């Protein structure tokens, strides 16, 4: 079974020897985690290989407050709108990696996050945490060295999440020693955020209005056929 395709999780050991495998990651890092959604859609429209910057993070915190401890950062690039068209999503239909073009996270931003904030994971709605033209996957390495997992190919339903206030629960396959796994990502949104859900989004949405919880649920996983 392929473990690094579709919506999936990269365990820290994928890029850092001796760090957590999928089965080693504490359950608490997967359940009911606060989410910080950082929007770089405009920047990614202007530049296909745009990378989340330290200034993007600081600007987000100016508007929304400091990223909470034990959070998951989700980077919203808008790239999900291209899924599953290979040319638009990856930048090429060939296996020539020099032709890959998609947004990611700048290594300086990865370093700043690990030195200044206490997150458990980071995800993006593009093929990789490092952008398409990355040669050394430095952002992967920086996060992995700090036992921070990565979520890649987050579904386009990410656009339904507010900048703050959502909670994330992950349902990975617990594979001993694995460096990655397919994962279902579920975001719980407080109904006070007044998020409208369109039936056209199915099957990428799991919606359950629960009076006792006053919450909507959105899945951020692609269905692979």
Image (spheres, grey):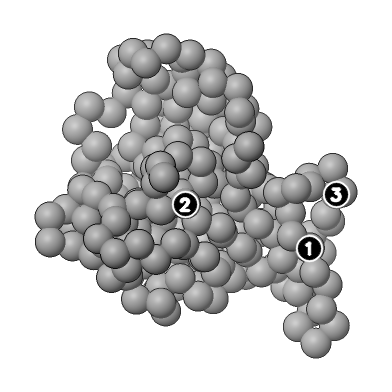
Q: Which of 134 and 218 lies nearest the eye of the viewer?
A: 218
Left/right placement of residue 105 relative to residue 198 reads: left
Task: In the rendered structure, find residue 198 and report the number of the disc placed on it.
Answer: 3
* Disc number lying in front (2 or 1): 2
Q: For marks 2 and 3, give the CA distance.
A: 26 Å
Q: First in sequence: mark 2 or mark 1?
A: 2
Task: In the rendered structure, find residue 148 and report the number of the disc placed on it.
Answer: none
* Disc number lying in front (1 or 3): 1
Q: Which of 192 and 154 lies nearest the eye of the viewer?
A: 154
Q: Residues within 10 Å of mark 1 (few under 14, many from 20)?
A: some
- C-beta proximity under 8 Å, tags 2 and 3: no
Looking at this rendering, what residue extends furthest in the left direction? 17
Left/right placement of residue 5 relative to residue 207 reads: left
* Disc number lying in front (2 or 3): 2
- C-beta proximity under 8 Å, tags 1 and 3: no
Q: Describe the element under mark 1 as helix, strand or loop.
A: loop
* As drawn, 69 above or below 62: below
């Amino acid at each position: 079974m392929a473990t690094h395709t579709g919506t999936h999780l990269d365990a820290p050991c994928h890029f850092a020897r001796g760090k957590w495998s999928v089965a080693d990651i504490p359950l608490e890092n997967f359940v009911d985690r606060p989410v910080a959604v950082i929007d770089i859609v405009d920047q990614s429209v202007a530049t296909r290989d745009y990378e989340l910057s330290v200034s993007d993070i600081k600007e987000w915190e100016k508007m929304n407050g400091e990223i909470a401890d034990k959070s998951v950062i989700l980077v919203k690039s808008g790239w999900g709108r291209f899924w599953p068209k290979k040319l638009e999503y990856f930048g090429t239909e060939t296996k020539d990696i020099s032709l890959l073009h998609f947004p990611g996270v700048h290594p300086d931003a990865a370093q700043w996050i690990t030195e200044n904030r206490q997150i458990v994971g980071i995800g993006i709605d593009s093929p990789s945490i490092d952008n398409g033209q990355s040669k050394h996957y430095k952002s992967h390495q920086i996060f992995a060295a700090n036992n921070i997992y990565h979520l890649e190919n987050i579904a386009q339903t990410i656009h339904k999440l507010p900048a703050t206030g959502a909670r994330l629960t992950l349902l990975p396959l617990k594979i001993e020693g694995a460096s990655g796994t397919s994962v279902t990502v579920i975001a719980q949104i407080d109904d006070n955020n007044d998020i409208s859900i369109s039936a056209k989004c199915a099957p990428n949405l799991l919606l359950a209005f629960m009076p006792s919880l006053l919450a909507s649920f959105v899945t951020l996983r692609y269905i692979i056929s």
